[in-house]
Image: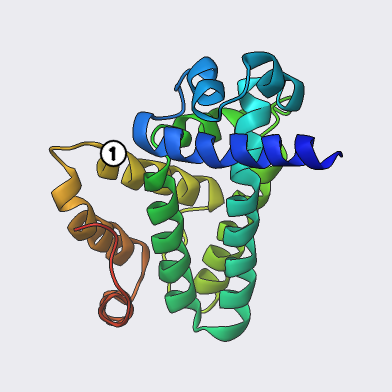
Amino acid sequence: MRADARKNRDQLLAVAGTAITEQGVDVSLRDIARRADVGLATLLRHFPTREALLDALLRTSFDELTAKADELERMSEPEDALVSWLRDCVAWTTEYRGVTVLMAAAIEDSESALHASCVTLRAAGARLLTRAQAAGAARTDIDGTDLFALVAALAWLGDQPSLAPRAGHLFEVVASAILTNAESGNAEAERRPGVRS
């Protein structure tokens, strides 16, 4: 890719990240192009669809959350690893308004540009959950799909102005409901900063 094309692409991604944080995933592509100081045709040349843009923007974060799950699996106790990853995942999804709707849809649509990244992320969380279940630290009547749904639900709470002040507390309620030893979840929460409270 030519240097000027690379510069335009990087600028579009930076602007898109800011725009989605401010306005949500339905922000106008024309507005993103205008804010990046390029034409809409340039945006569409790099990212022919909204999903292609979102995939390029979100893939790095998905990869980071997946890598974080791998690191936690190696370095932390099962219950702490699960709660820590869940907290990070919720915090990230709360940053990008409306992304949980896209993620849920992408899981079901194998043709979606976001499908592979979302499936990989869900699998990473499922591994942490299964590990905690095997250690007797998490309830066994939920699976990776349930965990992914809980991430979406908790992120939705953070997106609601009237409920956002309760999001940190409700995260702790949900985390303690997942764990069979709620004190472990509370100890982990005291060691780490919480989701917006």
Task: Name the secondary structure under disc 1.
Answer: helix
Placement of 130 over or under 39, stated as above or below: below
Confirm whether residue 104 shows in the render. yes
**Residue 66 or 61: which is nearer the viewer?**
61
Q: How is the protein colored in the picture?
A: rainbow
Q: Quadrant of residue 153?
A: top left
Q: How many marks?
A: 1
Q: Residue extending furthest right?
A: 1
- Residue 12 percent across, percent down from the top left: 60, 34
Residue nearest the observer in this picture, 95 or 172: 95
The residue depicted at 57 percent of the width and 60 percent of the height is 65
Q: Quadrant of the N terminus?
A: top right
Based on the displayed image, in which of its 4 quarters is residue 176 positioned? Answer: bottom left
Quadrant including the C terminus:
bottom left
Q: Could you say where residue 159 lies in the image, as x and y percent from the top left? A: 28, 39
Q: Quadrant of residue 6?
A: top right
Residue 123 percent across, percent down from the top left: 64, 54
Q: Is residue 161 above or below residue 148?
A: above
Q: Identify the residue shown where x is 52% and y is 21%.
A: 34
Q: Residue at horizontal 40%, vertical 30%?
A: 24
Q: Within 10 Å of the Cα at label 1, are there few (<14), some (14-19), or many (20+) other Cα atoms?
A: some
Horizontal relation, residue 91 to residue 133: left or right = left
Q: Which residue is mark 1?
A: 159
Residue 136 visible in the snapshot: no
Residue at position x 36%, y 62% from top? Answer: 178
Identify which amino acid the numbered label 1 is placed on.
Asp
105 and 176: which is toward the camera: 105
